[in-house]
Image (tube, rainbow, N blue to C red):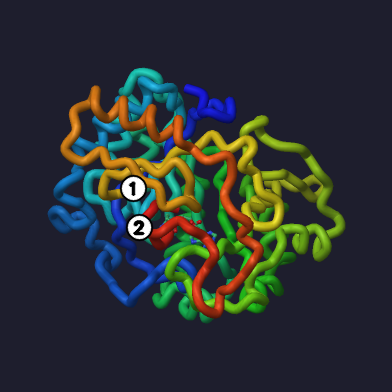
Amino acid sequence: MRDSFHRQITYLRLSLTDKCNLKCGYCWTSFQHDCPAGSAENGRLGEFTSFGYAERLMSVRAAAKVGISKVRLTGGEPLCYSGLVDFIADVKRVPGIEGVFLTTNGTMLADKAADLKGAGLDGINISLDTLNRDKYKRLTGFDMFDKAMGGIQAALSSGFGKVKVNVVLIGGFNDDEIGDFVNLTRDEPLDVRFIELMPMTGSPLFGKEAYLSGRVVLERCPDLKSVGMDDPSSVARLYALGGAKGRVGLIEPVFSSFCDKCNRLRITYDGYVKPCLHSSDEYSLVGKSEVEMERTIRNAIDAKPREHGDLRCLRTDIDGVTTGGRSMRRIGG
Ligand code: SAM
């Protein structure tokens, strides 16, 4: 289905839980540790009762009927969701869904990667913002750097083809590691994607200097050459070092907005459709039948705003200028 600005909406980012086993400084509003590593099997952990497995699957069916063909499972940390493997297999069976992908911090992936592949998962993005163990602990609150690296290796060896590593660029924290991250692409089929830090609701830990333009990557690594984009709707501009197995992507929502080709819709862990990450507009799917969900999703697509406001007017000493209304982990990144 097309929205009022003729954008074809085909991509759903579906949050499975707001729970996470890390508490990255840019994502959390409060200190809470509700999914310790290894606890994903712990009963209903990660399940929100008013909008659970069945309702979430129904929302995918309804979304597919309005033209969604690609689903990315996110959170919170989707590996904190106890039904993840079954859910992937069920989503893969929904008519119209052509690809199912996962965004994870990777720390619980080593044991699960093969099962996820077996369930039909098409690809994995792993978030990793530093290559330094101490800094990882400082940013995430937990000493799990080795587990995250193990997750990347597991993804590489489980037949996912190219694995994407997402790095949120944070001035004064990891901009000194840009070259090291780029070098990861030389010998492994890894796409390292630098994402501009967005001033999200409830992420007041950073000052203005943290908000860097993705262009800084090209300034620091002049050997990177443009290799275009994967497809016209992709938000990552791609670059590569000569002879490298992987590529470098720049995702620039703050300094070079890509709203004109936004093809996304989000559904939060608690069952609200969000047509735009930076708008507080939400459409509830809770308690609705599949037909009602379909209607609600159509309404949400119709109401998708042309663009988000200017995220560069940073008042980050107080709060972000996003009007998204929820922290990233409660929206689904
Ligand atoms: N737990 C999973 C993970 O770590 O990938 C999935 C959820 S996380 C919210 C999804 C993505 O959003 C991560 O790549 C994370 O770095 C990114 N993210 C969260 N807050 C952000 C912010 N303020 N600016 C830019 N990216 C952000």
- Indicate the secondary structure of the residue bearing disc 1: loop
- Indicate the secondary structure of the residue bearing disc 2: helix
Q: How crowded is mark 2: few (under 14 residues within 10 Å), some or many (20 or more)?
A: many
Regarding residue 114, the answer to whether it shows in the image is no
Q: The disc labelled 2 sits on which kind of residue?
A: Arg
Q: Is residue 186 left or right of residue 43?
A: right
Residue 251 numbered mark, or none: none
Residue 330 numbered mark, or none: 2
Residue at point 29% right, 32% down? 59
- Whether disc 1's CB lies below 8 Å from ligand 1 is answered no
Residue 278's x, y, as percent? Answer: 50, 53
Residue 238's x, y, as percent? Answer: 72, 44
Q: The disc labelled 1 sits on which kind of residue?
A: Thr
Q: How crowded is mark 1: few (under 14 residues within 10 Å), some or many (20 or more)?
A: many
- Do residues under tags 2 and 1 come within 8 Å of each other at their CB atoms? yes
Residue 268 numbered mark, or none: 1
Q: Which of 195 and 243 is in front in this view?
A: 195
Residue at point 66% right, 34% down? 230
**Going by the picture, which residue comes out furthest to the right?**
222
Q: In this view, does 128 lie to the left or right of 52?
A: right
Q: Give the spatial CA distance, label 2 vs label 1.
A: 7 Å
Residue at point 19% right, 55% down? 41
Residue at point 63% right, 60% down? 196
